[in-house]
């Protein structure tokens, strides 16, 4: 919160001024992303936490607020840091975190600022790997209460850290956890959030985060910016970015932060956790995926897909059409409204290739399509195409692989 009762008392007063034109209307107080302005004596007073983002300047109808950019030393950035939420499960960092760190490193370099990973958990065994994958600093908050990723705790702690350190950008994977608590963080901070992004970049002139996501069922790609609120926040679909190989020679700092449970009133309590045991291989992490679509005709025929997947040590995927028919659970769905995957090998059996499905798998390293329609859109993205009856082709493949 703002401190002091005059501009002269604030550290930022050398660079930001409130002129005599100020009427104390309060518009700037609503515009400030970090709540650093209050009206005192009928005039705006800027707090010591001001980071000169300029939101108040744009909001002021009287043009009473002005900013003089501070001189920067060589190599110094006026931008806040880029933060990545490092999601963990049972003490192990999720793969989606490393993918985000690769893109976050690129964004931070364009902004000439630091990359920070923020991790909540208990006995996190590979926190140092966040440095090896590109982070300059890691804020590590460990407690037995954080082991199960209870959203009330994560929300409070993330908000607290953001208010304290004021990053410019906050990124999280669009996993079930990221989709659940990151919007709550954005709402509390009164800032914008773009969900399920498939592309991120930096506007070099305005230093804004350019966020790209599909909309209207994947038929249109929307470009979104957040020019007046901070931090700029986005969740990103797993597997849309490739993680960089770890650099064991990188040096960084792991900063341990105390967890303040007593300051949080949790509204939920985790009673038990039931793992999904229907997948022998987790879809998002699989190197090989065999997917079935409407061409299978009925639920019983997914046993053929499961048999081929078993021989290959692969995960079983499905198109939305197959899921909508009730042939296979939603957890297997690949596509715009399902999971985004990027395996080394993706085998599509009886899938026509609607744009929504292609959006979820077209970054696969090798795509093999089996379909009896030579004009199916799936063949436009496939590296290898087999035009034929899947009920003849797939059994042949299984027999050949079994040797």
Image (cartoon, rainbow, N blue to C red):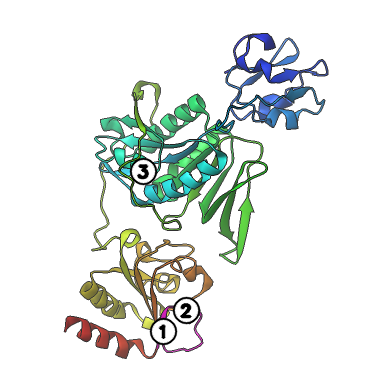
Q: Nearer the viewer, mark 3 or mark 1?
A: 1
Q: Nearer the viewer, residue 195 or 254?
A: 254
Q: Are marks 1 and 2 in contact (CB under 8 Å)?
A: yes
> Residue 27, position in %: x, y?
73, 27
Q: Which of 339 and 21 lies nearest the eye of the viewer? A: 21
- Asked if residue 103 is positioned above or below residue 61 in the image, the reply reads below
Location of mark 2 (residue): 378
- For marks 1 and 2 on the same chain, the one whose residue lies earlier in the sequence: 2
Q: Is residue 40 visible?
A: yes
Mark 2 crowd level (few <14, some 14–19, many ≥20, 10 Å Cα): many
Query: For numbered disc 2, what is the local secondary structure?
Result: helix
Residue 6 in sight from this viewpoint: no
Q: Quickly name the residue at label 1.
A: 385
Q: Which residues are magenta?
A: 371-386
> Which sits in the foreground, 322 or 58?
58
Q: Residue at x 44, y 41 (%)?
A: 84
Asked whether residue 344 is drawn in magenta, I would say no
Label 2 – label 3 distance at C-alpha? 33 Å
Which callout, 3 or 1, points at the residue further toward the start of the chain? Answer: 3
Q: Which residue is mark 3?
A: 87
Answer whether residue 383 is magenta in the image. Answer: yes
Q: Give the position of the C terminus as an image quadrant.
A: bottom left
């Amino acid at each position: 919160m703002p401190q002091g009762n005059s501009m002269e008392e604030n550290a930022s007063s050398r660079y930001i001024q409130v002129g005599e034109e100020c009427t104390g209307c309060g518009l700037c107080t609503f515009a400030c992303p970090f709540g650093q302005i209050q009206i005192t004596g009928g005039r705006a007073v800027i707090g010591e936490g001001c980071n000169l983002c300029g939101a108040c300047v744009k909001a002021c109808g009287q043009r009473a607020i002005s900013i003089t950019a501070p001189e920067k030393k060589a190599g110094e950035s006026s931008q806040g840091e880029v933060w990545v939420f490092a999601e963990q499960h049972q003490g192990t960092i999720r793969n989606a975190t490393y993918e985000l760190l690769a893109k976050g490193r690129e964004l931070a370099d364009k902004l000439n600022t630091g990359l920070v990973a923020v991790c909540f958990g208990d006995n996190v065994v590979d926190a140092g790997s966040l440095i090896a994958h590109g982070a300059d600093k890691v804020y590590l908050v460990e407690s037995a209460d954080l082991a199960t990723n209870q959203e009330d705790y994560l929300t409070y702690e993330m908000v607290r850290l953001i208010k304290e350190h004021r990053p410019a950008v906050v990124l999280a994977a669009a996993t079930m956890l990221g989709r659940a608590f990151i919007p709550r963080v954005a709402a509390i901070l009164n800032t914008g959030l773009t969900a399920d992004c498939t592309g991120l970049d930096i506007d070099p002139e305005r230093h804004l985060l350019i966020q790209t996501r599909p909309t209207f069922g994947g038929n249109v790609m929307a470009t979104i910016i957040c020019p007046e609120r901070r931090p700029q926040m986005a969740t990103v679909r797993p597997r849309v970015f490739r993680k960089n190989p770890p650099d064991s020679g990188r040096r960084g700092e792991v900063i341990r932060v105390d967890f303040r449970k007593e300051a949080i009133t949790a509204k939920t309590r985790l009673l038990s956790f039931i793992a999904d045991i229907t997948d022998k291989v987790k879809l998002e992490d699989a190197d090989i995926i065999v997917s079935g679509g409407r061409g299978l005709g009925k639920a019983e025929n997914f046993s053929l897909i499961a048999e081929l997947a078993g021989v290959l040590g692969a995960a079983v995927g499905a198109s939305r059409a197959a899921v909508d028919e009730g042939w296979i659970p939603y957890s297997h769905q690949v596509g715009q409204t399902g999971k985004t995957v990027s395996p080394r090998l993706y085998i599509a059996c009886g899938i026509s290739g609607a744009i929504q499905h292609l959006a979820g798998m077209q970054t696969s390293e090798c795509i093999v399509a089996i379909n009896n329609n030579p004009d199916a859109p799936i063949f436009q993205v496939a590296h290898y195409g087999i035009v034929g009856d899947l009920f003849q082709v797939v059994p042949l493949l299984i027999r050949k692989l079994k040797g």
